[in-house]
Amino acid sequence: METSYPQKSDRYMEYREMLLSKGFSEAKQNYGRFFRQATEQTAFVVNCEEDDESCITIMYGFTSTAYMAGDEEWFSNHGSDNEDCQVRNILCVWDSESETDAKKRISDFYEQYKNYTKDEILSVKKERQKLFFDHFSRALKPLGFKKNGTKWTKVLTNSSALTFHAQKSAFSDQYYFNVIVHNASNLYTVYSCDRVVIYGSDIYNWQLMTEEQIVNLVQLTLKNYIEPKLN
């Protein structure tokens, strides 16, 4: 049985009609997720969510359709989650000025990457990951931490060590941040493990964090989780 379209503001519906008129498809089972084929194995994604009548949040980016197991029917039904879109940005539209800026930013982003293959899109993602993790390396290296993948470890005594671990979610392109005290020779012999938490903030969706949010995350991690254990 076909369900009716959820009630949305006039502005939201105008955006929807504009996207559909430009060749985008809307996910059949997830309203507000729009996509258009870019290259053979990539699609340009625009996800719209109306937080309230004053703001429409737009996530836009490129995703690999091959990443969706090559299942075109699944993709047409569900579209792309924000967290599964390999290269993504986010913005909020609340007035005519921000709308004009949003259109330009989204258009410029599309023009920049529209001809990128799946492998090239994934390469851009890796570059973004490196820049993200460089923030942690710059803060932790002076304190004596050594990096190995997404773990930074400092030996405290002959028997214990402290590790900051950016842990990849098993279900999406998100990270969780853990501070672990463990046996110096065995990471899995854990004495304590604290997950970094900033209440009221989505700190895990790393590509959607601003530069300021990343810096704040690093500083909070040092002040509240790492320095107390070093001291």
Image (cartoon, rainbow, N blue to C red):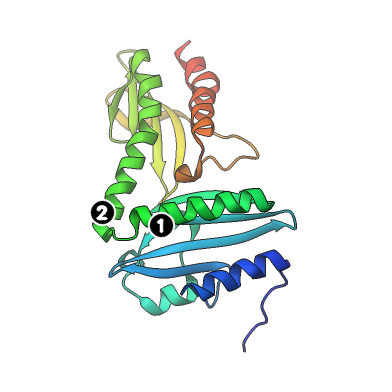
In primary-sequence order, the first of circles 1 and 2 is 1
> Do the residues under discs 1 and 2 have CB atoms within 8 angstroms?
no
Residue drawn at x 42%, y 28% is 180
Tell me the crowding category of disc 2: few under 14, some 14 to 19, or many 20 or more residues within 10 angstroms, Cα based: few
Image-quadrant location for residue 135? top left
* Residue in the foreground of this view, choosing between 159 and 213: 213
Q: Position of residue 220 (x, y in %)?
A: 54, 25
Residue drawn at x 68%, y 81% is 4
* Residue in the foreground of this view, choosing between 69 and 95: 95
Q: In the image, is 99 to the left or to the right of 196? A: right
Image-quadrant location for residue 115? bottom left
CA–CA distance in space, label 1 to label 2: 14 Å
Observer able to see residue 47: yes
Residue drawn at x 66%, y 77% is 5
Observer able to see residue 26: no
Amino acid beneath label 1: Tyr
**SS type, badge 1:** helix
Residue pointed to by mark 1: 110
Amino acid beneath label 2: Glu
Q: Position of residue 7 (x, y in %)?
A: 73, 72
Q: Position of residue 231 (x, y in %)?
A: 48, 10
Q: In the image, is 74 to the left or to the right of 153? A: right
Looking at the image, residue 43 lies above or below residue 1? above
Look at the image and tell me in which quarter the N terminus lies: bottom right
Q: Position of residue 182 (x, y in %)?
A: 38, 26
Specify the label residue 231 is tagged with: none
Looking at the image, residue 183 lies above or below residue 79? above
Q: In the image, is 102 to the left or to the right of 72? A: right
Residue drawn at x 29%, y 52% is 122
**SS type, badge 2:** helix
Q: Residue furthest top?
A: 231
Residue pointed to by mark 2: 120
